[in-house]
Amino acid sequence: MPGSMKANRVAASESTVNEPRSGDDPITINTHAESTVALLALSTLGLAACSGGSSSPSAPPAPLTPSTPTGVAATPGNNQVALVWSASADATGYAISRGTAMSGPYASIGESNSTSFTDTSATNGTAYYYVVSASNAMGSSANSAAVAATPVAMSRTAAARFLAQAAFGGSDADIQNVQYQPQGIQGWLAQQFAMPVNPSGQLSNVAWMQANSLISVKFDTSGVQSSLWRKLISSPDVLRQRMMLALTDLFVINTGATTLTYRGAAAAYYLDQLEANSFGSFKDLLLAVSHTPAMGQYLSFLGSVKANPITGTSPDENYAREIMQLFSIGVVQLNMDGTPIANPNDPGVPLATYSQTDVLNMAKVFTGWTLNDSATAYPGASAATDMINNPSGLDMTEKTVLGQTIAAGLDGEATLQAAIGILMAHPNMAPFISRQFIQRLVTSNPSPDYVSRVANVFKTTQGDMKSVITAILTDTEATSDVLLSNPLAGKLREPVVRFIQWARTFQLNFSPTDATQWATIGDMSDPSSRLAESPLQSPNVFFFFQPGFIPPHTALQTNGITAPEFAITNESSVAGYMNFIKNLIAYGIGGVTGNYGALQPLVNQGGDSAALLAELNVLIAAGQLSTPTLTLMQGALDSIDVVTVGTNDRLFAALTLVMCAPEYLVQK
Amino acid sequence: MTKPASRREFLKMAAALSATRFAPPFALNLAALGESAAAGATDYKALVCVFMIGGNDNFNTLVPYDAANYAIYNQQRPAIATALSDLTPTLLTPATALPGGEQFALAPVLSPLLPLFSGGQMAIMLNLGTLIEPIASAAAYADAPATSLPPQLFSHLDQRAFYQAEGPVGNTSGWGGRIADMFAAGNGNSLFTCISPDGDSLFLTGLNTGTYSISPTSGAIPVQGIVSPLFGSSACQSALKALTTAQRKDASGNLANLFEATYADVVSRSLTGQQILGGVLPASTVTTFPTTTKTNLSAQLSMVARVIAARNATGVGATRQVFMVGAGNFDTHDAVVTLQPPLLSDVAVSMAAFYAEMNALGLQNNVTSFTVSDFGRTLNSDGDGSDHGWGSVHFVLGGAVNGNNFYGTAPVLPPSLTTPGPLDVGRGRFVPTMAVDQFGATLGSWFGVSDADLLTIFPNLSNFDAGTRNVGFMQAPPA
């Protein structure tokens, strides 16, 4: 008999696994409890071929409910999940339901008359499960198998890359925290900006040194050095700590190079003042720095007094010069994009921002400043308190600096405020400072447009640090692929940042209160055996490297690419670093090794090092190790027989290879 | 001696340079590769620059001693003047007395240098500083157009750069390196031409010659994971070497990233340098340095002595080398009487010991060391220190030096606190009467650089009268 009714089939029991169901059968008896109507339907094909028979004449066939959708796929995005599926025959529409557990409950979140739907009410970081059913006038199909998706703001690699710019890399949990932010990196930044100074029971530098009986130690900076490593390595406010490193690169002090008795206390207070203002305004940073005994001593205006015509002394010019040259406007007039303003009279000669006369007059501003001797809580307290101004030493004459006049008769504070105000208003400040912060965080030779965008934010917010930091880290030059694919772009990671990355990623477990442990780190500036740089240890106020450095005899030089960190990269320091990092990875520091627990299962997963390398690539190198590099590494690592020698050799070798690889060392 | 006439010879030399270093990024100045390069020196010479970083206070280094000048010195900086009685033991009696009965004494802590001065091995420059062209007086300075003055006078970074480069910050080579450019191809391995135990510097950066960095304490440092198995694995040892020296290419065969390529180049040189030097650097030939080197400067000069001792070793074969060492913290705005003496003592002890080592090697006539600094400092004090100055005092030390003499003209000191001297541009900052160009050219000439090449290496030298371009503090070579 031509045509036949295909046998009804009892639907298989509703399955809860994501297996494609056989959906080819045109006739289905839906025995699922949720079905609305169970119909016995005839294939129209079958009926069409049916010749007249002895049975009663055929009625028009009843329409069928659509089949259960198959091929559902979910693609997580930023606070959304995009769903697609295969079309169901006879469907006129689809219903999408969502739950937060595989087993449900599922609730309807919307409908679609196409085979796609985007859930825009999802939140990053939450695991969602979706099912789709098809419907028409006759009713609905069963639900599809469920698919799972967790929306994320960005890929794991992109999040790791962001942390390389904004923090010191991070652990898997740190990376997920970025990925799962509902507001993406803006959300992460808001989280960080909201963190108070000294969060979670951390102590300030001064308080920690007091607690460890270090604050009154004379002629010593090892205590404050320990305190700073404690902050940089273990304080939860990572963005602030990364900015602290940038700020100590810019506002350089080395109280160990001064004659200060309580140089440790002075440096501790100095650091605390930087931290307190790190997310405030640049003006407040300059004011705070200018009040610290550490800076007063380091750049020698503490005790400087107005000119004495009898003895012939004149005010100290040191800070007056360096606050302009290094801390605010620089020596060369700049466009907003950081390029020097062209000299119409002589193309080869840049235009100077200030003259020796400006220095002389600025020196008069920094007169009369003395230690606050009423600070007597402990020996050295005056070194850890703002300087005060003694009118008898203050030059109260009218002064003209950078074309602006500071009125006569103002007291020390008002004079200082006026001088800082003049600097803040100078058009050089925005590009000069912005470009350096970009160099510290993201890339060594930013495009002029990038500098310009950040400088304009600096200018319009008058140096609001949160706005400037946000502008730097959210700029498309930082977040897009532009830097990844430009052979001329990059940033040789500061050796100190590489060290802190290791310490934070592998949870260097020093006790927060144990000063002895933190003291095992010490001065890291020896290039032969350490990092060739160390905060608070700069040999002079120009820091270990300068923003305009271009390595000679290189293609970077041919292309005019500034690459500051290469100033400390030489035949000695590269060897010193590789030896240091190898030993650090294997033996830790201060007798404390890194915590590699999360990596151990990967060392020989599947019998080789591929999984380990894949993880290290993201965790340490933000995914920037190329496939040929990973292949080379894997070939070498797999030759280590972990069955015989254990997992450590392969693990340590892998981490050493990664942390010595140029693709890691150059952040893109 | 004729120039290497053929362009072919020049290009061969340029190719030899680039094979051992980076390809020269600049169009080489043909005129620059003149007679000096053809010298193919058979004797050995070395220049050692001792950079006092920060601007050494010259008036407390070489102190006015005669009554009239001492009185002015004391008047200008009463709180920090060295007591006259402390200076008597180090009073200098040069072979040619200064006119007008002017006398100077070394700072007491510089006493180790006294016998070297009297013995004829040390010369003293009286008023050396950065100049583009001669400036006759403070009045001339006040009227001088900006282009005739070194830019950013009194700024550390700029003056430091100018001292080293004869150009402002942004200049890409220094005269030590430019001198070395003339001779690098004549060395067995041009890598070991400019050497520094104190990091990279502009001074030692030539147009083609770069600086080889060495550790003051450890010499050429081996990378443990490359010279021996990495965590027991020779495969990982090879991989580490391959990775860190690779000039990684993209799919089109171009360098994938210039930062990476630059880093890999440094590693390659480090490995090459260590392979050669590591085996031949004497454990120690030095006998006069303290066995436990107390200062970094002492360790640096000690290492320079050992490198010089290894100049003929396999793979080195050097005939001309330029070194730079540095000592920091001379920027004594404050507390000069506390801070400066230990620094000066360090310089004196270290340089004297270095000279003794060269003597022991029989190289005292082949090696000349000299001091430089960012600038001098103000005669006038700001209380317990002084500020950035200009013309300064410097030493040249070696067996080939015409020692026991002063060179140049000391500035006339200000008659009173309110009357400047004729060269005084304010507070006892003095216009130099000897330019770094002239000073450097004298050293370069001794080193074997021709007069024509000196004019290329020292861009401002032609602004000075031909008869003044060689200051005369180096002995004429033996007949």
Image (cartoon, grey):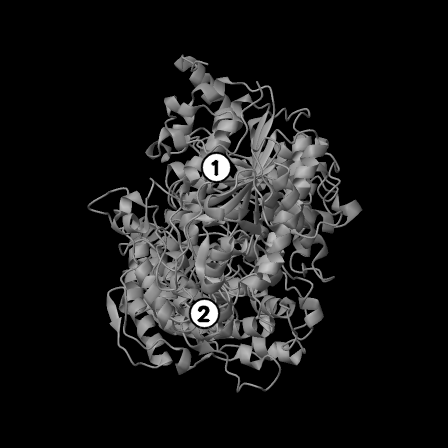
Evaluate if marks 1 and 2 touch, with contact meaning CB atoms under 8 Å apart. no
Q: Quadrant of residue B479?
A: top right
Residue B252 in percent (x, y) is at 41, 31
- Of tags 1 and 2, the one toward the viewer is 2
Mark 2, Cα crowd under 10 Å, few <14 / some 14-19 / many 20+, is many
Q: Amino acid at mark 1?
A: Thr
Residue B427 in percent (x, y) is at 39, 60
Q: Amino acid at mark 2?
A: Phe
Residue sticking out furthest to the right: A644
Residue hosting label 2: A301
Label 1: chain letter: B
Label 2: chain letter: A
Q: Is residue A165 visible?
A: yes
Nearest the camera: B36 or B376? B376
Nearest the camera: A4 or B392? B392
Residue hosting label 1: B205
Q: Quadrant of residue B456?
A: top left
The CA distance from mark 1 to mark 2 is 35 Å
